[in-house]
Every structure is written in C-alpha cells, then in structure tokens.
Amino acid sequence: MKKKYFVPMLSLVIFVFALGLTRHLAIPVDNEPNEEATYIEENLLVNKDDEHLETELEDKETLAKAKLLAVGDLMFHMPQNRAAYDNGENTYDYAPFFKHVKPYIENADIAIGNFETVTRADREYSGFPRFNTPKETLSAIGDAGFDILSTANNHCLDQGKKGIIDTIDSIHQYSMINIGTYKNRDDNQILVKEINNIKIGFLSYTYGLNGLDSLLTEEELSYMINLIDEGRIKLDIENAREIGTDLVVVSIHWGNEYQRKAHVSQIDLGEKIIDWGGDIVLGSHPHVIQGSQIVERDGKEKFIIYSLGNFISNQRQDTMGNSYTEDGLMVEIEIEKDLIKSETAIKDIHFIPTWVYKYREGNKVNYEILPIEDILEENSSTYTSIIRRLEKSYEDTIEKVTENSLYSELN
C-alpha cells in the first residue's frame, strides 16, 4: 500500500511522522462483535468471525464515495519543449514527464490541475513571458489521467482570443474539460460532475491577465475569462447549490509569486468562499507550496490549500535561485455521501509531495515528476545523487502544508 501523509477529517489534530514511517489512516468502525449469531439479508449468518461483513453491506447500500485528486501549476517553458521534441518523428512527447505519477492520477475519480499556458496552433511556440505550447502537452496530460483543467490564470490570454479558443478545443480533443475560460457566453456555465451519486460543482477564477485585458473587447472579457469578483463568486456558488450539487470546488489563481506564506487577502477571500457555501478551495499562482487549512462551518469541515505549487515547470534553483519552485504536491481528497440523509462530507485528505527531476542523459535533457516517498522507498541507485534534495523537498512541503498557525486561524 502506498504511504501518504494524511489529514484525518474527524479531528483537527495534525500528526507529523518522521520520514520513512508508515502514514496510513484506518477509520475506526464502531462494530462490536455480537455474542449471538445474527441473520441479515438472504439469511446470511454473521458470527463473530464475520463481524465487519454486516457493516460493509450496509455501507455499500447507504454510502457513496469519490476521490478527487488536485495538483498545481502545469507549466511548459521552452527547455521542456526542447526536451520533449523528437527529431526523428518531428513531434513532441511529454508522456515521460508523468510516468511516475500517472498511477495516482488514474486512481482518482476526478483529477484536476491548473493548465498555465495556451496552445495556439498558428503561432510559434514560446515560453515566458507569453506562453504558447504544443498541444501534445495536453495529449500527455490527458493520457496521465486528468479530467478537468482550470484555465483561468494570468497566462490564459497570452495569445489573445484565438489562444483561448484553440486551447479549449485542444483540451476537448483529448477528452478533458476546462473551467474558467470559455468560447461563448452560453458555455460559461457551472461544471457539474456526478461520481457515484455525488454531484460536484467546479468553478475557476483568476486575479488578472498580465495587463493583456485589451486583447478582448469588454463584452468578450465579461464571459470568456472568469476574473475574481466577490459578488460573482458568491452568486456562482449559490447557483451551484441551487442546481443540486453536493460539494463545490473552487480553483482560484491568486496571491504573490514565490511567497511561501499566504497573503492576508488570500486568507480573507478563502474564508468568504467557505462562508458562501464552497467546500474545497484549490489555490495556484505563487509557484511554491503554501499552507492549507481546515475550516469548520455549520458542523462540517471544509478545506483550503492556498497554493499547490508547481506540478511541472522549468522553474528551479539553477534557473531562478529558488529551490522551492521545484516542489509540488498531489492532494487526494476522499469524499463520502450518506445516501439516506443526503449529506456529503470530506472524510480524509492525503498529501503526496512531488519533486521535478531535471537531468541529462547523453545529449538529451529529461524531466520527471517524482512522487517523493515512492522514490525513497525504492532506494534505487538511479536517484542516489538526489536523495538529500528529495528528503529536503519532502520535509519542506509537509511542514508548510501542515503549519499549525494556518489550522488555528479560523478555528
């Protein structure tokens, strides 16, 4: 069984174990053994040796479960594009970037990330400051198992209106859905995904567009990109509730780049989103990991993570002098719905730290997203030279996402 750092939702106590110890949650079940044999459906006899069977059958009938996996920024700078280029085939292959994390992504019922670039077909590829990326990036992202991409971010207008449209078309081509940017006014609707009788609403917003707002008319800007507007966010969450969603997830592009501490404006808006009826807030933009927070409202626990960091990029110590830009995170959120009471709750949260490995093999540069604990457990000679860096990344990430101050601020 894979080990993951978890946050038990039944309490606000954070357990931080030493690296290498098992991190696994078993939810206790109140199921005392019966002294007398008991008959259940179809006269099936349950004795003390089968004490969990009745509970399992009841859960199957009354409980629905879903697993959401979220990651941070999916960015593609020019060195990554060159690394993915196949001279012989004259095409791009980004699949190796995701080979180690693909099992986690595929295992989720819904996987979501922030696609922080565009794929405009009729222009040359480019990196920062105005991105344009081969659509083969989306082929690899879809193949890795992603279902939803948030596209409301400060780079979504880098290639103008056509860049937005081409990106949406490419996302759909590879059987994914985007939120936050739209081709037509009628497309700008709340996305609802139903998984195992659990209806989850998805919303997405960005703080700004790097000053490129004028590339759209005022009318186009009003519906093609969801900009952060408190009144709009509140109304969207209320509408999501009115159409029968059990849970509302808000992806939001905010905060200060490269700052590992969430800004007060993020904390303030995050709290408002929860007050308005949001359940999960997924932050992006800072390109480093920021803290997370469990917030209790009306007897239910909600979750905010202020920044999920870079899942894949070329930002790193040797390019920016900032090693924290190499750190990433997969967050598994387990959701459970009581089908009798029609009540939905977040049951568990698992933090799975990742690290972007950039290395040279012969004349070729390669990138791999490494799930840190898996690599450390393998103890493979392939990664001997980076073991200390992996250990530091793991410790930095876990320390940041479980900061006690963030957990206590709203409770």
Image: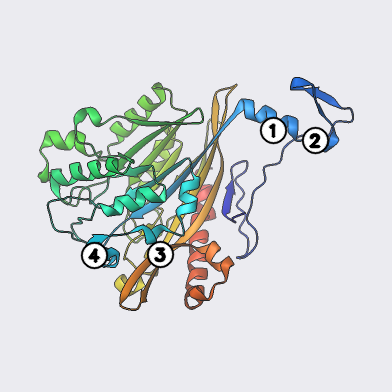
Q: Find the distance from the CA under tag 2 to the CA under tag 3.
A: 45 Å
- x, y percentage for residue 113? 37, 48
Q: Where is residue 117 in the image (x, y as percent from the top left)?
A: 25, 53
Residue 247 coordinates in the image, percent (x, y): 46, 32
Which numbered circle lies on residue 50? 2
Q: Which mark is residue 39?
A: none
First in sequence, mark 3 or 1: give its number: 1
Element under label 1?
helix
Mark 2 burial class by Cα count in 10 Å: few <14, some 14-19, many 20+: few
C-alpha span from label 1 to label 4:
51 Å
Side (left or right) of 76 relative to 304: left
Q: Is residue 273 above or below residue 105?
A: above
> Tag 4, which secondary structure?
helix
9 or 181: nearer the eye? 181
Q: Which of pointers 1 and 4 lies earlier in the amino acid sequence?
A: 1
- Which residue is denoted by mark 3 in the rendering? 368
Q: Residue at x 45, y 53 (%)?
A: 102
The quarter of the picture where the N terminus appears is bottom right
The answer to the question of whether label 1 and label 2 lie on touching residues, with beta carbons closer than 8 A, is no
Q: Name the residue under label 1.
A: 56
